[in-house]
């Protein structure tokens, strides 16, 4: 008996059949493969010069009509092909004008080409596939979630090739390597592995490459589909991979010796390996003066502690250790809790849940309505609950402060993990006061210390280098001219960043 | 996985380290909403050697639109302070917390028994709730409870009055606040300590608490009360003075009000071999001319000199009285030995061994010097401009 009912019978592993389509390569078999597909198209083209006939097949919507017309049909109809018995060779030589033409000998190859935007040209003596894929895509726009004050205003889009070109525009080095893999049996999503040759540790590249090759899923349609399989600690709620929509941040990661991952259909770039500091640092940190950036970074670390510990600390103090707070504060809390029917832990947990509901409702609704929900939920209902003595003002302040502190985290995945642990710590504080809170915090630290991402401890830079001075970024950011070395724990082949 | 499980179990096992209860695994929760905070504790002796404990809270807010409620005052008697405090628990509306008691008042009568202070303060020192940083007072009124009960009203609690008194101690410098910790440290040093004395004063608005002098404890019991002037000199010698007023009458009949603004004391031991034979104390005071009523011209140096001499004379005379009292009684309540031991750490042991013999016969030479700042005389400026 499982947690959610009876255990289902074990389903055997479905081995991938390769090649998938094994019939003879002809038009009828191809049509049979795409039977029931209204977007499968065929037509016959006849050369006006030689009278020779060709069969052309493609998947509508995946090809760009103009390209098919201009690069394939038009030359076939109008150009005098060389007189030869080998029609395929003649077409390959001058019968099509597009960049990519490949000779195919198996049905499986042709099918795979068609679904990614090729057109199949059946000649008398063979089959050619011509790359006429459409490149319809969203234009490059400013990043929405990672605002750039002084940085570049471009962001990744859904087109993989556009994203690789954005990366190349930021790093115009011939050392930039882009390896491509196809992930997903059904989605066949191209995934690009990007790194700088001669800089990035090759063992790291190899490890990530192996992880990508090992992914055997039906479809890669979101970042989670990828991260969940690449992450080394699969049960952890904390993210182990940084996703950014800003190419400059993505390239900064590559320059530090990390490995980038881009996926077709996902307007984000992934950076591996991920560690704690990366999730607290914001892209703007390098845009500001080092003193300002350090102050903001310190503030974010304080907010991290506040969002995680504040509700738990309040519960512990108000329920177990009221002697430790200043008398005036204790009196103020007592006075605010007069006639409130719930115990402090219950009050805090209830409000935390309400806060999460409000946040979730605001996210799911359109932006304008979402704001209304926030105002009604936060101000009107909150105020009413306090006036009706259902909640005490102190609890509202504590939970709101913890929530707002959580919003300062630059990474949403990291912020979400903190939200989960905030509940855990609050519950433990309700159970055993400061003792429970400290035990929970110790558990969290052990959990984080136990995590690794491709050989890099998750608590980097606080748990590496045997206590040596950390270059560049830790709780404070060094002046840029002082950070001579890259992040050494990544073991880059080229360790020096500047002279 | 196994390691993680073991780590988790080890961490969970820390929950058993509560040490507060043998039977309960987890600490006992007491929600702050059900707490009655007590702020002031008064200790008296009852008949047959029992202890009377009176505790008082703060003024309670009256709720929406309601008038404030007078503070809760709870009294109980027991063989020990702890016993009485435990009885008090059963009378409160919620859990009566002694954790926020910030003032402890002892009646002189209760403190006059041998070892009285050590006995009565033992609860404050030992109890896990009470704070050792609690302010400590003594009163010569008929009971310490009277201080609490007669000053509590809808508008003010004893606590509030004592807190305000604590802040204002420095204004007159006839004393200084002393915490239980400081007092017990003084007592453990040489069995002597100074504690501010509280008195009730009736005025048109009712009864209020005042404090203008220090009491002197010796052998762990109340001994004697210093005069306000002696208390001020003690504050100067302890360098705990913040400000203070000294009024003088000059030869021409002018009355002068001086505001004390600073003090510096130098203690110089005189050794003959390994024997302490004397002590030179140099006190340097600064003061402002706060007020003059008369015809003296303070722009003349001889008037200023006369003022300084008179001022030095007054302070020196009272200080000599205080030092003489201390020597006569063999009670080093100014903790001179501790001061000298800090100055000469190598003589610490010899001072400790011989202090009782040396101190009464010590040749103490006191010098008081002062610097009085003449304030700006606006009338004189006008006169000069007119001329």
Image (cartoon, coloured by chain):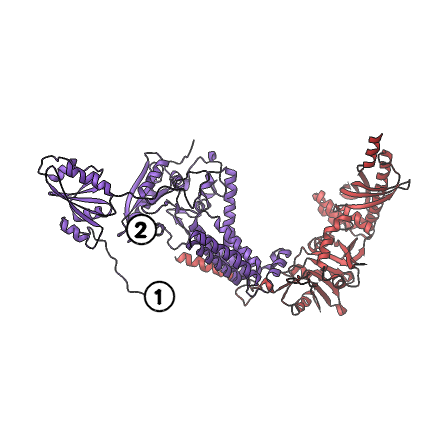
Q: Which percent across, then down, holds residue B213?
A: 79, 53
Residue marked by disc 1: A2
Tell me which label, 2 or 1, sits earlier in the chain. 1
- Closer to viewer: mark 2 or mark 1: 2
Picture disc at residue A220: 2
Q: Which percent across, then down, holds residue A273?
A: 38, 45
Left or right: A79 as drawn, with respect to A454: left
Chain label for disc 2 = A
Camera-side residue of B234 and A183: A183
In which quarter of the view is residue A388 placed? bottom right
Left or right: A352 as drawn, with respect to B92: left
In which quarter of the view is residue B20 placed? bottom right
Chain label for disc 1 = A
Q: Which percent across, then down, holds residue A111?
A: 20, 48
Q: Residue furthest top?
A: B387
**Quarter of the figure that contains the C terminus of chain A:** top left
Q: Which percent across, then down, holds residue A209?
A: 31, 45
Secondary structure type for disc 1 = loop
In which quarter of the view is residue B269 placed? top right
* Chain seen in purple: A
Location of residue A457 with respect to B36 vertically, above or below: above
* Mark 1 crowdedness (10 Å alpha carbons): few <14, some 14-19, many ≥20: few
Q: In 3D space, how far apart are the residues under numbered discs 2 and 1 (Cα atoms)?
A: 28 Å
Q: Residue furthest left?
A: A85
Camera-side residue of A285 and A228: A285
Camera-side residue of B267 and A233: A233
Secondary structure type for disc 2 = loop
The answer to whether residue A120 is seen in the rendering is: yes
The answer to whether residue B14 is seen in the rendering is: no
Look at the image and give the colour of chain B: red
Left or right: B344 as drawn, with respect to A305: right
């Amino acid at each position: 008996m499982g947690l959610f009912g009876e255990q289902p019978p074990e389903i055997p592993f479905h081995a991938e059949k390769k090649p998938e389509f094994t019939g003879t390569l002809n038009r009828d078999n191809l049509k049979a493969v795409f039977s029931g597909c209204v977007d499968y198209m065929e037509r016959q083209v006849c050369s006006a010069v030689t009278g020779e006939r060709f069969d052309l097949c493609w998947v509508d919507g995946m090809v760009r009509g103009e390209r098919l017309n201009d690069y394939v049909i038009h030359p076939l109809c109008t150009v005098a092909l060389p007189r030869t018995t080998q029609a395929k060779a003649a077409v390959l030589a001058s019968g099509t004008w597009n960049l990519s033409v490949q000779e195919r000998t198996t049905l499986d190859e042709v099918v795979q080409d068609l679904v990614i935007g090729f057109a199949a040209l059946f000649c008398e003596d063979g089959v050619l596939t011509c790359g006429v894929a459409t490149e319809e895509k969203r234009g490059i726009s400013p990043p929405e979630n990672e605002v750039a004050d002084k940085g570049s205003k471009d962001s990744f889009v859904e087109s993989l090739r556009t994203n690789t070109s954005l990366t190349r525009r930021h790093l115009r080095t011939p050392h930039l390597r882009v390896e491509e893999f196809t992930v997903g049996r059904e989605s066949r999503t191209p995934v690009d592995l990007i790194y700088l040759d001669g800089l990035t540790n090759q063992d790291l590249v190899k490890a990530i490459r192996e992880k990508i090759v090992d992914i055997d899923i039906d479809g890669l349609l979101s970042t989670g589909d990828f991260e969940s399989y690449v992450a080394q600690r699969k049960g952890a709620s904390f993210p182990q991979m940084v996703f950014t929509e800003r190419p400059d941040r993505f390239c900064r990661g590559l320059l530090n010796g990390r490995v980038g991952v881009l996926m077709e259909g996902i307007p984000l770039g992934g950076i591996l390996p991920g560690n704690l500091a990366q999730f607290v640092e914001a892209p703007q940190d390098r845009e500001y003066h080092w003193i300002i950036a350090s102050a903001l970074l310190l503030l974010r670390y304080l907010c991290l502690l506040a969002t995680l510990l504040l509700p738990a600390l309040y519960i512990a103090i108000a329920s177990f250790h009221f002697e430790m707070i200043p008398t005036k504060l204790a009196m103020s809390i007592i006075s605010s809790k007069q006639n409130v029917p719930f115990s402090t832990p219950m009050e805090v947990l209830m409000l935390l849940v309400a806060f999460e509901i409000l946040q979730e409702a605001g996210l799911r609704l359109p932006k304008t309505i979402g704001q209304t929900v926030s105002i009604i939920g936060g101000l009107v209902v909150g105020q009413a609950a306090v006036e009706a003595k259902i909640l005490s003002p102190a609890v509202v302040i504590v939970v709101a402060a913890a929530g707002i502190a959580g919003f300062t985290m630059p990474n949403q995945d990291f912020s979400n993990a903190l939200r989960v642990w905030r509940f855990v710590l609050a519950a433990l504080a309700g159970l055993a006061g400061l003792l429970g809170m400290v035990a929970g915090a110790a558990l969290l630290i052990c959990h984080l210390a136990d995590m690794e991402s491709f050989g890099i401890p998750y608590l980097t830079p606080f748990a590496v280098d045997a206590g040596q001075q950390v270059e560049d970024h830790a709780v404070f950011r060094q002046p840029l001219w002082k950070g001579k070395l890259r992040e050494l724990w990544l073991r880059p082949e080229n360790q020096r960043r500047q002279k | 996985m196994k390691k993680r499980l073991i780590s988790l179990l080890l961490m969970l096992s820390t929950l058993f380290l509560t040490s507060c209860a043998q039977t309960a695994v987890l600490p006992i929760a007491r929600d702050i909403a059900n707490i009655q905070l007590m702020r002031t504790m008064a200790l008296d002796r009852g008949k047959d050697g029992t202890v009377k404990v009176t505790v008082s809270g703060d003024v309670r807010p009256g709720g929406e639109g309601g008038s404030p409620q007078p503070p809760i005052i709870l009294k109980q008697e027991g063989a020990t302070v702890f016993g009485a405090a435990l009885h008090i628990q059963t009378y409160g509306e919620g859990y009566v917390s002694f954790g926020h008691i910030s003032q402890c008042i002892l009646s002189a009568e209760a403190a006059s028994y041998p070892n009285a202070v050590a006995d009565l303060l033992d609860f404050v020192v030992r109890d896990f709730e009470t704070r050792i940083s609690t302010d400590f007072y003594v009163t010569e009124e008929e009971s310490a409870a009277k201080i609490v009960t007669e000053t509590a009203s809808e508008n003010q609690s004893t606590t509030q009055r004592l807190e305000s008194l604590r802040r204002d101690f420095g204004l007159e410098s006839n004393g200084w606040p002393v915490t239980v910790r400081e007092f017990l440290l003084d007592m453990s040093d040489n069995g002597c300590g100074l504690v501010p004395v509280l008195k009730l004063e009736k005025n048109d608005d009712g009864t209020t608490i005042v404090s203008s002098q220090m009491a002197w404890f010796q052998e762990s019991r109340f001994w004697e009360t210093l005069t306000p002037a002696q208390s001020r000199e003690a504050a100067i010698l302890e360098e705990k003075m913040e400000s203070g007023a000294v009024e003088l009458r000059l030869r021409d009949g002018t009355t002068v009000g001086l505001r004390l603004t600073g003090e510096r004391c130098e203690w110089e031991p005189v050794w003959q071999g390994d024997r302490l034979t004397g002590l030179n104390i140099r006190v340097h005071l600064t003061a402002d001319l706060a007020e003059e009523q008369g015809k003296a011209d303070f722009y003349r140096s001889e008037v200023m000199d006369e003022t300084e001499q008179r001022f030095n004379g007054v302070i020196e005379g009272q200080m000599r009285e205080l030092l003489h009292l201390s020597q006569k009684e063999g009670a080093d309540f100014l903790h001179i030995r501790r001061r000298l031991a800090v100055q000469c750490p190598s003589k610490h042991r010899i001072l400790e061994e011989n202090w009782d013999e040396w101190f009464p016969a010590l040749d103490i030479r006191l010098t008081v010097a002062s610097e009085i700042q003449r304030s700006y005389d606006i009338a004189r400026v006008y006169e000069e401009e007119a001329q």
